[in-house]
């Protein structure tokens, strides 16, 4: 049975593609959960229209994300941590600390969007990438200073 996927599915394909699946799988799983629609003539036309609407919405969100990226790259935040001998930090600066610092600056971020490879364990200035939208990544400055 041919169906049009409405959402990305790792085992079948991406949204908007036409795939051939077993009739029972389509009838019992995909169609009731609204993950796919049958690939008939009317549904193909309707889905093409819906796809164009989704593309315009995505383009609008992408433009907004570029604006947020520009704002994020202009500011920097500083995080004060306790240090011991030889300016070694007690603990480390994590994505949660960076999220709190940016919320004090007026930006609401999700800690999963902060793409920190590993926690920061020393004083200094670091460039931290933050995912604003799917492929839009802002590089911001984070200052780790003594408390």
Image: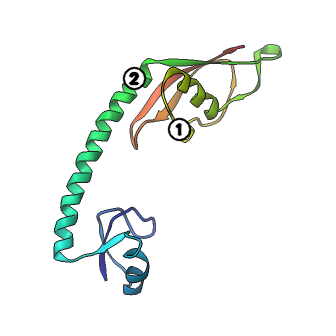
Could you tell me which residue is drawn at 51 percent across and 21 percent down? Answer: 105
Image coords of residue 35 (percent x, y): 38, 69
- Within the image, what quadrant is residue 64 found in? top left
In this rendering, is residue 1 above or below 110?
below
Closer-to-camera residue (96/137): 96
Name the N-terminal-most of marks 1 and 2. 2
Q: Is residue 127 visible?
A: no
Position of residue 16 relative to residue 28, above or below, is above
Left or right? Give the position of 104 relative to 68. Answer: right
Please tell me which residue is depicted at 16% across the width and 73% down the height of the picture. Answer: 42
x and y percentages locating residue 126 in the rendered image: 57, 22
Residue 33 spot, x, y in % from top left:
41, 71
Q: Which mark is residue 101?
A: none
Seen in the picture, residue 82 relative to 53 is either above or below; the reply is above
Question: Quadrant where the N terminus lies?
Answer: bottom left
Q: Quadrant of residue 101?
A: top right
Query: At numbered mark 1, what does the secondary structure look like: helix, strand or loop?
Result: loop
Circle 2 residue: 71
**Measuring 38% from the left and 66% from the top, which residue is drawn there?**
13
Image quadrant occupied by the C terminus: top right
Residue 125 lies left or right of residue 28; in this view the side is: right
The answer to whether residue 137 shows anywhere in this view is: yes
Rendered view: 102 above or below 12 = above
The residue identified by callout 1 is 110
Q: Tell me where residue 20 sits by quadrant.
A: bottom left
Q: Going 43% across and 36% down the picture, which residue do you hit?
A: 132
């Amino acid at each position: 049975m041919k169906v049009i996927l409405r959402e990305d599915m790792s085992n079948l394909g991406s949204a908007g593609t036409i795939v051939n699946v077993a009739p029972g799988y389509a009838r019992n799983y995909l169609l009731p959960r609204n993950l796919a629609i049958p690939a008939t003539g009317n549904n193909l036309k309707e889905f093409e229209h819906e796809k164009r609407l989704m593309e315009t919405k995505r383009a609008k969100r992408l433009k907004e994300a570029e604006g947020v990226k520009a704002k994020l790259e202009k500011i920097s935040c500083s995080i004060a941590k306790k240090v011991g001998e030889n300016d070694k930090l007690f603990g480390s600066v994590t994505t949660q600390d960076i999220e709190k610092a940016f919320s004090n600056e007026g930006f609401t971020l999700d800690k999963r969007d902060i793409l920190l490879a590993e926690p920061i364990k020393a004083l200094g200035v670091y460039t931290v990438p933050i995912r604003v939208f799917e492929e839009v990544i802002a590089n911001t400055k984070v200052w780790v200073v003594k408390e």
